[in-house]
C-alpha cells in the first residue's frame, strides 16, 4: 500500500475512534457516510486468529462495534471457511481473506490490530509477532503459557509502544469492581486470605492417537509445543460449540488453574492491589507428597496475605472486619458479622440492588476508585485512540498469568517456591530455571 495513502487511512480511523470512544453504543459510522456512494475506509481494520468458539463470539462482538474485519486465520479448514463466511455475510461482500499461517495477518501492514484466541501455547508467539509488526493486540486469557513468555510480552509492548488488552473480562463487570473497591478501601480490614475457586491444575497429555480427517494442519496446531499424535479432544474437527479440553494439558494450557485462574486469581490481584507486583512465595498443599492433592496450593504476599486454591464461591476475600464474596452475577458482603448485601441466588432480590447498597453504605467517599470499564472490547477500542493502557493491559495480564503459573509449578513439583516479583525470577536459590519456560519446537521461539 502507498505509504501516504496508508497514513491517510490511519488518520481517518483515529478520527473515527475519537468521535466514538465516549459513546455508549457501538462504534459505528454516521448514517450519512453509509449513504455515500463511495464509502471511506475509516474503520479500524482487524484480523482474527484462532477461529474456535471463543473467537466466534469475539469476531461478532468486534464487528458489532463497527470494526472492519478483513482476515481470519485457523489451521482447520472448516473453521476457517466458517469464519470467512461470517465476515463476508456481515460485510456483504466476498473480500475477507482466510489464511492458515498467522503471519499473513500479523505482518500485513494494512491491518491495525489483531484478536488472538488460539490455544494458550500459541498466545505469546503470535502476540509478539503482532506487536513487532506495530499491531495493537487483544489476546485471550491466560496471556501466556509460561512465566518467561509473560516477561517477553511486556517487553514487546514497551518496545513497540502498542496497546494490549487481555481477555480477563471480569474486570469490566461491576460486581467485581465494587468487590475490589470495598477491599482496596479497607472496608473489610486487612485481608488475611482470598479463596479462589477454580478446577484442577494442568496434567501431562496422555491421549491416544486417532485417525484425522483431511483439512487440518496438525503440525501447525502443535506449533511451539511438542508434536504428538492427533486427538479430537485437543482439536475437535470443524465447527463445535464447546471449549475444547486442550486447556487441561500442560503442553498446551495449564488446567483450570490458568484457564479460570486467569479470571479469579486476576480479581484477587486487583483486590490486593498487586497488579504491578505479585506474590513472594508459592506453596503446594500441605499433604501434597502423600496425596498429590489438586486443591490447597497457596500464593503468599509480602504483607502476609494469601491466595488459596479451594472449592467455593468464586473469589472470597476474608478480612479482619468482614468478607466479600463475588462471582459472575453473584455478590455477598458482610461487615463485622452483619450481612450488608447479598445476591447469591434467586430470592435474594437483584444483583444491582445488592451492589448499590454496598456502594451507598461504604463507598460514597471512597479514596480509591478503580478503573471503570463497562464493556471490555469498547475499553480496548477507546484505548487504541487515547493510547492509554486498557483495564487488563499487558502488565495486568502478564502478572496475573505469572501467579497462575507459579501456583501450577507448586502443584507440578511439590516444592515451596520463593519468588522475586520485582525481577520476575526465583529467589533464595529456589525453583528451577526450566520451570520458567518450555522447550520450543522448530522455528517457534520466544
Image: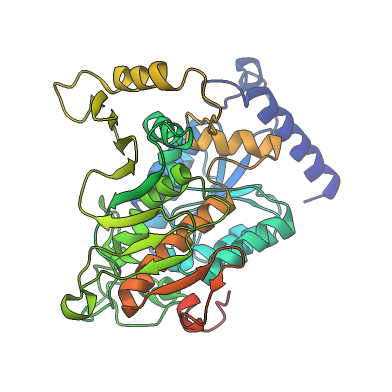
Name the quarter where the C terminus is drawn: bottom right
- Name the side, left or right, on which 143 lies relative to 244: right
* 354 relative to 330, above or below: above
Q: Locate residue 155, reporting x and y percent.
A: 67, 63
344 or 361: nearer the viewer: 361
Q: Locate residue 123, reporting x and y percent.
A: 49, 62
226 or 404: nearer the viewer: 404
114 or 424: nearer the viewer: 424
The way the protein has been coloured in the rendering is: rainbow
Viewer can see residue 292: yes
- Name the side, left or right, on which 365 lies relative to 156: left
Q: Locate residue 357, reporting x and y percent.
A: 34, 17
Image label count = 0
Judged from this view, the residue extending furthest toward the left is 347
Q: Locate residue 332, reporting x and y percent.
A: 27, 31
**Residue at figure coordinates x 47%, y 69% from the top left:** 146
* 196 relative to 121, above or below: above
* 142 relative to 284, above or below: above
In which quadrant of the rendered view does residue 205 lie?
Answer: bottom left
Viewer can see residue 138: no
**Residue at figure coordinates x 57%, y 77% from the top left:** 445
Amino acid at each position: 500500500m502507498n505509504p501516504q495513502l496508508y497514513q491517510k487511512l490511519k488518520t481517518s480511523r483515529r478520527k473515527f475512534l475519537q468521535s466514538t470512544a465516549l459513546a455508549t453504543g457501538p462504534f459505528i459510522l454516521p448514517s450519512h457516510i453509509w449513504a455515500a456512494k463511495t464509502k471511506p475506509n475509516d474503520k479500524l481494520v482487524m484480523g482474527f486468529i484462532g477461529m474456535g468458539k471463543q473467537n466466534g463470539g469475539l469476531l461478532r462482538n468486534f464487528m458489532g462495534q463497527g470494526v472492519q474485519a478483513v482476515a481470519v486465520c485457523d489451521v482447520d479448514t472448516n473453521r476457517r471457511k466458517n469464519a470467512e463466511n461470517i465476515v463476508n455475510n456481515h460485510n456483504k461482500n466476498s473480500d475477507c481473506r482466510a489464511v492458515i499461517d498467522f503471519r499473513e495477518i500479523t505482518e500485513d501492514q494494512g491491518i491495525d490490530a489483531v484478536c488472538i484466541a488460539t490455544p494458550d501455547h500459541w498466545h505469546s508467539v503470535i502476540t509478539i509477532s503482532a506487536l513487532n509488526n506495530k499491531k495493537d493486540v487483544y489476546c485471550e486469557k491466560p496471556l501466556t503459557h509460561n512465566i518467561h513468555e509473560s516477561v517477553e510480552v511486556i517487553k514487546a509492548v514497551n518496545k513497540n509502544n502498542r496497546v494490549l488488552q487481555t481477555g480477563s473480562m471480569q474486570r469490566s463487570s461491576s460486581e467485581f469492581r465494587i468487590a475490589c473497591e470495598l477491599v482496596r478501601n479497607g472496608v473489610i480490614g486487612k485481608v488475611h486470605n482470598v479463596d479462589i475457586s477454580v478446577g484442577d491444575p494442568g496434567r501431562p497429555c496422555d491421549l491416544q492417537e486417532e485417525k484425522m480427517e483431511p483439512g487440518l494442519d496438525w503440525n501447525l496446531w502443535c506449533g511451539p509445543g511438542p508434536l504428538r499424535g492427533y486427538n479430537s479432544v485437543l482439536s475437535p474437527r470443524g465447527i463445535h460449540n464447546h471449549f475444547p479440553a486442550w486447556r487441561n494439558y500442560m503442553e498446551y494450557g495449564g488446567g483450570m488453574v490458568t484457564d479460570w485462574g486467569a479470571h479469579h486469581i486476576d480479581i484477587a490481584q486487583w483486590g490486593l492491589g498487586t497488579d504491578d507486583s505479585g506474590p513472594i512465595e508459592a506453596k503446594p498443599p500441605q499433604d501434597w507428597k502423600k496425596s498429590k492433592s489438586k486443591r490447597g496450593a497457596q500464593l503468599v504476599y509480602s504483607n502476609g496475605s494469601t491466595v488459596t486454591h479451594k472449592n467455593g464461591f468464586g473469589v472470597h476475600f476474608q478480612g479482619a472486619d468482614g468478607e466479600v464474596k463475588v462471582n459472575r452475577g453473584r455478590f455477598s458482603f458482610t461487615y463485622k458479622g452483619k450481612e450488608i448485601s447479598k445476591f447469591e441466588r434467586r430470592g435474594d432480590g437483584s444483583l444491582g440492588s445488592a451492589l448499590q447498597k454496598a456502594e451507598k453504605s461504604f463507598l460514597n467517599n471512597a479514596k480509591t476508585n478503580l478503573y471503570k470499564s463497562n464493556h471490555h472490547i469498547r475499553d480496548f477500542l477507546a484505548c487504541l485512540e487515547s493510547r492509554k493502557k486498557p483495564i487488563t493491559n499487558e502488565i495486568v495480564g502478564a502478572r496475573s498469568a505469572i501467579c497462575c503459573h507459579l501456583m501450577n509449578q507448586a502443584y507440578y513439583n511439590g516444592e515451596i517456591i520463593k519468588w522475586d516479583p520485582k525481577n520476575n525470577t526465583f529467589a533464595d536459590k529456589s525453583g528451577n530455571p526450566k520451570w520458567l519456560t518450555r522447550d520450543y519446537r522448530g522455528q517457534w521461539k520466544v
